[in-house]
Amino acid sequence: RIVDTRMNVVENTFNVLFLGSGVSTAVPNLTHILYCNNGSTSKDSEADLSYPKNCDVCMEAMNNNKSRNRRNNVSIAVIFDELKPIIHEGENVKKCQRVVVIDVGKTMREAFLTLLPRYGLKKIDSIILTHGHADAIFGLDDIRDLQICKTVKVEADRTLNTESSTNSNVTEIGFKILSEPMNIYLNHETKEVVDQCFSYLIAEPEFLDEKNRILKRRVALLNFHIIDSSSTFNVFGLPIRSFPVFHGGEYISLGFSIGKEAEFVYISDVKIIPKDTMEYLKSIGRIGTLVLDALNTTTGVWSHMGMEEALQVAEILNPKIVYFTGMSCSIGMHDEVEARLAKLGTTFECHLAYDGLLLEGFQGH
């Protein structure tokens, strides 16, 4: 359903829309649909012994388009109004709605098409990347689809005969980009991965007419901003503090504290929180809303926390509310897990995030 109304954002606040809450492979799992639930040809194979015969979570997610068990790659959109000073008709500020997305993974396109129209969101203004894995960066190519362009004819000089240097005007079809380049915020390590995976996106664009921003080939126009893993920066006036966590071994993924200090803390991909980061998180006061990685109900895997570990972290930090994200189907049925979390008796609320969850009214400053 497409909503042709602007999302309401109270002044000096921001909203958070979960575009994805699932593991890298997303939910439903391909094998659980194609192999397990359809039966197999070899009853004694190792694969038959390793996989469940049926995965109720994946089947429910497959058959129900509105299922909260259906999960894209982890990603959120932060929506807020930028106040721009102007002098116009007696007003001195203008509200400009901004949408900043954290991570654009393999399921970005599906998430955008499914969820942005539901809330009347028509554009993306900036992107922040947590790390360089496929589930965080592989949607970068599709950013060109978010940039408005039109095809135009351009007269270009071409040498027809190299020996006589005979020139002739040739009409070429180019792509005039009407949108501004997309700002991408990322650390140095992630930029190196982007350089390797998307050489055509980091190269200097090939223009037919640079002054009028007419490209020879339609690719995304991107502006990369390198940030330190521990740094404070702002995007359209919204303050953001990055901090490093370990996403398997000592591989760094970034977490973020967004808006007013301790208002909203987002840690999507983590196995271990380093000592310095934990000290920082404990120093900022009681966290209002904490989003934390929880792959499954137990102790996770080498690169991701499970819910047992995530709950231990939450006990230490004692936020007001914690939302778990990055779940695989092994987390269980969404509603059943929610019911169990409600009975834990913790000093904080516990919930599973889900695709399309909208949280509103966080303080921006």
Image (tube, grey):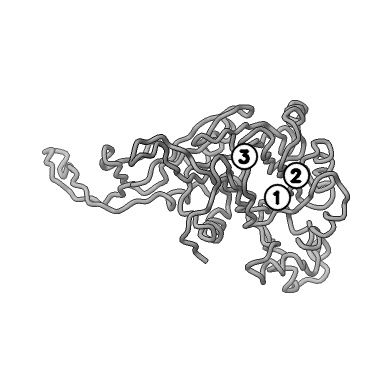
Work out whether mark 1 precedes mark 3 in sequence or the reverse, and give the earlier one: 1
Q: Residue furthest front?
A: 90
- Residue 69 relative to residue 19: left or right: right
Q: Nearer the viewer, residue 305 or 341?
A: 341
User: Percent position (x, y) of residue 67?
Assistant: 68, 65
Work out whether mark 1 precedes mark 2 in sequence or the reverse, and give the earlier one: 2
Count of numbered circles in the view: 3
Name the residue carrying label 2: 304
Q: Amino acid at mark 3?
A: Gln
User: Percent position (x, y) of residue 145?
Assistant: 43, 53
The reply to whether callout 1 and callout 2 are in contact (CB within 8 Å) is: yes
Residue 267 found in image quarter: top right
Q: Amino acid at mark 1?
A: Gly
User: Who's the residue at 82% across and 52% down the image?
Assistant: 297
Q: Nearer the viewer, residue 92 or 45?
A: 92
User: Mark 1 or mark 3: which is in front?
Assistant: 3
User: Mark 3 or mark 2: which is in front?
Assistant: 3
Cα distance in 3D space between marks 1 and 2: 9 Å
Estimate how packed mark 3 is, as few (under 14), some (14 to 19) or many (20 or more) residues with alpha carbons within 10 Å. Answer: some
Cα distance in 3D space between marks 1 and 3: 25 Å
The reply to whether callout 1 and callout 3 are in contact (CB within 8 Å) is: no
